Image: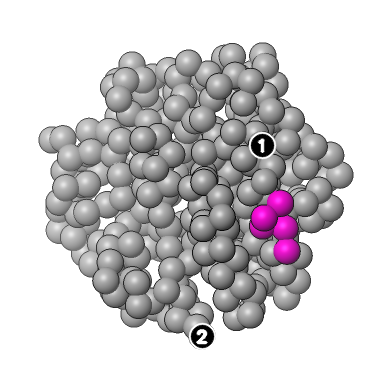
Amino acid sequence: MNNILVKNYNFHRHVLLEITKQCNLQCLHCFTEAGHSLAEELELDDWKLVLKDLIDNGFNAFTISGGEPLLVLKKIVPLVKYIKQLNSQIKVYIFTNGILLNRTNLHRFKKYVDGVGISIDGCKRTHDWLRRQDSSYVAAIDALSLLQVEKIPVFVQSMVTPQTLPYMEDVVNICIDKGVRAIRFSHVDFYGRAIKHKQTIGCDEKHLISLNSTLKRLKEKYNIYLTSNLVKKTELQKNKVLFTIPSLHILPNGYVLPWYGFPLKLALCKYPTETFSNLKKQVLDAKISAFKEIMENSQAYVSRSNMRNIIDYDNIVAHFFD
Ligand code: SF4
């Protein structure tokens, strides 16, 4: 049974678990359009079934995200404990906006997680503006300080928009100061709420080129792992797997998407009624080849300067915890 999906279909090993749509922020760029819970979100026992099925199929790294996962601590604390009981080698990360992270909360899950992800989007002004809450930057920085004191490995996700682009180096400096291990700079993908704000926060070609050249300069200057969600198409041709292997995203109501932001009609299955372990091989074969065809032929992710969006969580996770 072990490794069936990961080995036979060449999936990314890492899975994003969107545990709830509920969030204490309503960010302009939110690709999942988080805010309120969905009417039918999976219960704790359903999530346990999801995890068992995915681990049985060879997945070995999970990021619990949302929405804001710390709003559902009652679910995530037993869940992370359950994962480590199943297999202590499985990597577990929690991705949060940091607002609810305090010592008491942290101590409830600290011993079961391998790291925490925090968002820092440019400077205080741009971060608070994108997140539509004045205190959100200070809360995120306080969260970084707490995680540093508690010696928990941290990676930062930083949103790149025309407004935050000038502050990439400031983000790197503050992260180095707080002992962060890795930073991922992502230009906004236009899914969810971000679609409504495309004109304001979307990067044009000039911005994308600047993102890439700034990243290159910062990589040379600083000793911290830096990456982005862009790669030159020429590089992709050398390493096509970066773009054409499925990277699972589980929605709060159990839909399993082969790639972040994909439409529901392209879902691979829906927990808890369908699992990978009971899905017929022919059905999965057809869905995976449809996914690969879309990714290979889609121009939606290609910029004029021939850069393509990628999802490289495996790389950040592999580097992060070496
Ligand atoms: S981007 Fe994150 S913090 Fe902001 S609304 Fe979406 S889930 Fe919440």
Residue 286 numbered tag: none
Q: Nearer the viewer, residue 230 or 136?
A: 230
| Residue 59 in sight in this render | yes
What residue type is disc 2 on? Arg
Residue 310, located in which quarter of the rendered image? bottom left
* Local crowd size for mark 2, using a 10 Å CA cut-off: few (<14), some (14–19), many (≥20): few
The disc, 2 or 1, on the residue closer to the chain's N-terminal end is 1
| Residue position for label 1 | 177
Q: How is the image coloured?
A: one colour
- Identified at 41% across, 54% down, the residue is 312
Residue 222 coordinates in the image, percent (x, y): 56, 50
Residue 235 coordinates in the image, percent (x, y): 34, 72
Magenta stretch holds residue 144? no
Quarter in which the N terminus is drawn: top left
Is residue 222 rendered to the left or right of residue 250? right
Q: Dominant secondary structure of the magenta stretch?
A: helix
Is residue 170 rendered to the left or right of residue 56? right
Mark 2 residue's CB less than 8 Å from ligand 1? no
Could you tell me how far apart the alpha carbons at marks 2 and 1 are, in whole angstroms? 36 Å
Residue 304 numbered tag: 2
Magenta residues (range) = 166-170
